[in-house]
Image (cartoon, rainbow, N blue to C red):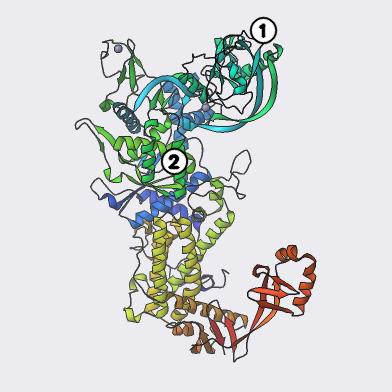
Amino acid sequence: MSTDSDAADADAQGDSAGDGDALPGEYDPAAVEPRWQDRWVDEGTYEYDGDADVDPNTVYSIDTPPPTVSGSLHMGHLYAHTLQDFTARYHRMAREHTFFPFGYDDNGIASERLTEQELGIRHQDYTRREFQEKCREVCADYEAEFTEEMQSLAMSIDWTNTYKTIEPRVQRISQLSFVDLYEQGREYRQRAPTIWCPDCETAISQVEQEDKDKHTLFNDIAFDLVETGDGEDEPDEDATFTISTTRPELLPACVSVFVHPDDDENQHLVGGTARVPIFGQEVPIIADERVDMETGSGVVMSCTFGDQTDIEWYQAHDLPLRIAIDESGTMTDLAGDYQGMSTEEAREAIIEDLDDAGALVESRDHDHTVQVHERCETEVEYLVTEQWYVEMLDRTDDYLEAGREMEWYPEKMFTRYQHWIEGLEWDWCISRQRDSGIPIPVWYCEECGETIMAEKEDLPVDPLSDDPPVDSCPACGGSDFRPEEDVFDTWATSSLTPLINAGWDWDAESEAFTMEHPELYQFDLRPQGHDIISFWLFHTVVKCYEHTGEVPFENVMINGHVLDENREKMSSSKGNVVLPEEVMAEYPVDAIRFWSASASVGDDFPYKEGDLEAGERLLQKIWNASRLIDQLTPAPEAVEAPAEEDLAAVDRWILAELDDAVASLTEQFEAYEFSKARNELRSFFWNTFCDDYLEIAKQRLSDGGDPSTEYALVTAHRTFLKLFAPFLPHVTEELWQRLYADGEGSTDPGDELNSVHTTDWPETRGYDADLDAGERAMEVIAALRRYKTDTGLPLNADLDRVRVYGGVAGFENAIAEAMHVDSLETLDEAPDVSTEVTGVDLDYSLVGPEYGSEVGDIDAAIESGEFEEVDGKLQVAGVELDAEMYEIEEARTYSGEGEMIETENAVVIVG
Ligand SMILES: [Zn+2]
Ligand SMILES: [Zn+2]
C-alpha cells in the first residue's frame, strides 16, 4: 500500500491552518515522548486508587517480576515489561482499579557478584555488615538507572507502590514466612548431602543447577580384587577388574563398588572386596539395579559423592562417608599427597600417578553432561552439610493441581511447570552460606542444640546482632545460644511477591495473618519469562499455597525471549547484543512498543528494525489522519449524534465496522493476544478507515458540514485513540490532550491531567449495517479511483455513467458522491464476459522430474494449443498432468458498452 496517495497524508502536508490550535504538520516524538513520561510520573497518573473496601472484581492486580539487580536493562527486560504494560493499560481503561507495582530483587548471589565485580572486591574480605553496605550502594545506583529507563519506556507503573527485597518490610515478610512454615511442620534442618557450588561456597537448590556439555577424559582404572564374591576361592595374586570414571580425584572418597544384578559377566565379584589403587582402602562389591551396564565395564565405584546416584547408594546401603573435597573444592587430608590441590589439579596428578603405578588401563576422550551452578557455571559438588529445607516432595501432586487451577497464556507453558514438578528430586534447600541475604531468624542452644525460633512480632531480626526471645533453653535450661549465620536463598523471598504486594503481615493482637490489601489477592496476573517457571512461579505457588491455602494467581502470562535479527540468541560472546539505549536513541518509544506487540505471547522472536520503522510510519499516519479530521470537523463539543434515520449509510457502516473492531480487540486484550490485536487494529485503521472511509468523508465534508459524517469521524477518531492507547501511549495522549481532553491548554503541566489512559475503554454502540455491502462499496470506490488515476483524470472529475454488479445496496449514494458519478446503476446480472484460454503455466519443478524428456513435447503441444482439461487434469501430448502441475491462463473480455473493471467481489463498468 502506498502511503502518499491517500487523503490523510496528502492533505495534511504543508497545510497551515489559520487557528493557533491546529496540529503541527509533523509529529515530533523526540519532544513529545519525554514530556509525557515526566508528566505521568509527576501527576501519579498510574497510582493505584483502590483500597481494602473495594470489590475485588473491580480490581486488576499484576504481580510484576522484580528484576534481579545483576546489571543493566537488556532487550528481554524491555520486551517483557512492555507486554505487562499493554495489559496494565488495557485493564486500567476497562476496569475501575489497576494495581501495577514494581520491585527490585536486590539480595542474593546475583547482586553480590555484581558488587564484587563493580568494586573489584571479594566478600570474604569484609564482615557481613560491611559487605551488605557495599551491596546496597551498588544496587541503589543500578536501581536508580533502571527506574529511569522503565519510565523512559512509558511503563505505567505505580511508582508509589515499589519494594526492594532487602528492605526491612520485606525482610519481615520473608522471616514470617519461614516461621509460619516451621510452625506448620513444613521445614526441617538436616545434615545431609547437599548440592554445593565450590566457587560461590554455598549450598544451592536443585533448580539452580543446570546441564552443561563438557569435554573430559574417561579413564579405565584397574582395581585389585582382594576377595572373590563366593568367598571360597582366594583370587589370583594379580586378579583385577576395571572401572571407568571421569573423576579419578574421587578415588580417595571411594566407599564401594557396584555391579548390576543382571550383569552375568561380573557377577562373581559381588560379595567380594576390592582395593582402591594408590589410596589402598578396601571396599565392598555390592549388587544394585541403579548401575548403568552400558557405560564402561559395567563395574562402577561409589564415592562421597560424585553424583546423585552416589547419594542414593549412600542412603540405601548405609555406606560410610569419606569426604575428600571441602567447601571450596579443595582436596582434604583424606587425599593424602593430593591435599590442598583443587579437584582439577588432583585429577591430573592422580591420572599421572595411576599411569606410573600401572593401574591406568586407558584414557580416552569423552563428551558428557555435567551439572553446573547457573550463576557461575562452576561444576557442582555434593557435600554433606547442615541446611534448612522446605519440604516439597510429599506435596508435588497438590502443587501440580494448583498449577492446573491457573489459566496459562499460552496454554502450552503449563507442561514446563508440570515437567519441573515431575522431575523434582530434592526438597527445597533455602539456607545459603552467603552475606547479602535476609538472615534466618534462628538461634541454637549451645548445650543441647535446641532450635530457638524468633517470635513473629519481633521480626525482622538478625540473630548475629539480636538476642534470642528466651533467656534459657526450653529444653535443657542452658543459657548460651549460637546465632544462625546463614541467610535465605533469594527465591525464598522473591517467591513471596504476591504477599509483599498485598501487604501480608502478622497481627500479634489477633494472632492472625492479615493483608493490608486483601482485594488484590489472588492476583489477576503473574507475568514472567519461560526460563523462570521452575524458579519463580513454582516457588511462589508453593509458598502462597502453604500460607494462604490458595493459588496466588488467576492467570499466568509467559513471555518468550528476544533473539537477534537472524533468530539467534543474543550474547556478548557472539557480539550480536542489541542494547535498549541504542534502540531508544534511534526510534520513538511508541515504535519500539509496536514491535514488542508483534509476537505471540510465549514465542521467542527476533529484534527487527523493519517493525520499528513500520511503527514510526504508523505514528505519522495517525498524526496525519488526526490532523485531517481536526480540519474537517468542528470543535468536538459541537458535534452531536444525529438521529438514527439521519445517519448516512456509509457513516453507519464505519460505525458498525468500529463496533466489530472494538468487540474483537476487547476479546484479544482479555486473552493476552496482543499481536492479533495490533495487526487487526493497524489494518482496520490504515486500510478501512484511512484509505476507504476517510476519502469518502473528506469528499462529503468538502462542500460544507454534514452532521452525520462529522459525528462518525469524531466518534471513530476518539475510539481509535483509545484502542491505540495501550500500544502507543505517547502519540495517543498528545492527540487526546490537544483535541479531546477537557479544559483549555491541557498540555501545560499546571493543569490537572485528564489522561486518555484513565478514560474508559470503548464499548460497542450497537450500530447495524450490511458490512459486506459496505466493503464491496469500498472496493468499487477504490476501483473508480484507480480508473481515474490510470486514465489521467483528476480525482474530482465527473463520471457520466457507472454500472455496478455485486451487492452494494444502500451504498449507491455513497459511491456516487465520493466518485462524482452522475448516474449510478446497479446490475442484477453479471455483465457478459467471454473467457478465452490463452495458455498453460507449467510448474516445471513437478513436471520435470515426472516427465523428463517428454517435457519438450508437452511444451510444443501447449504452444500449438493442442491440450484439453478433463476432470481437473490436463491432457496434453499423450500424458495427463495433475492439477498441481499446471495453471490454465485465461483472458476475460468484456465486449459491451464502456470499460469493465473487476474487483475481488464486484464488477464495475464505466461509461
Ligand atoms: Zn556458583
Ligand atoms: Zn538446650
Q: Earlier in the sequence, mark 2 or mark 1?
A: 1
Crowding at dot 1, Cα within 10 Å, few <14 / some 14-19 / many 20+, comes out as few
Relative vertical location of residue 89 with respect to residue 446 in this rendering, above or below: below
The three-letter code of the residue at mark 2 reads: Gln
Q: Nearer the viewer, residue 188 or 267?
A: 267
Q: Nearer the viewer, residue 202 or 146?
A: 202
Q: Nearer the viewer, mark 2 or mark 1?
A: 1
470 with respect to 161 (left or right): left
Crowding at dot 2, Cα within 10 Å, few <14 / some 14-19 / many 20+, comes out as many
Q: Residue furthest left?
A: 509
Residue 726 appears in which quarter of the rendering? bottom left
Q: Which mark identifies residue 256?
A: none
The location of residue 426, given as percent across then percent down, is 44, 29
Residue 875 appears in which quarter of the rendering? bottom right
Q: Name the residue beneath numbered marker 2.
A: 418
Q: CA distance from mark 2 to mark 1?
A: 55 Å
Q: Nearer the viewer, residue 443 or 884?
A: 884
Q: Which mark identifies residue 237?
A: 1
Q: Nearer the viewer, residue 436 or 622?
A: 436
Quadrant position of the N terminus in the picture: bottom right
Instruction: Look at 52% across and 13% down and name the residue there.
Output: 322
Secondary structure of the residue carrying tag 1 is: loop
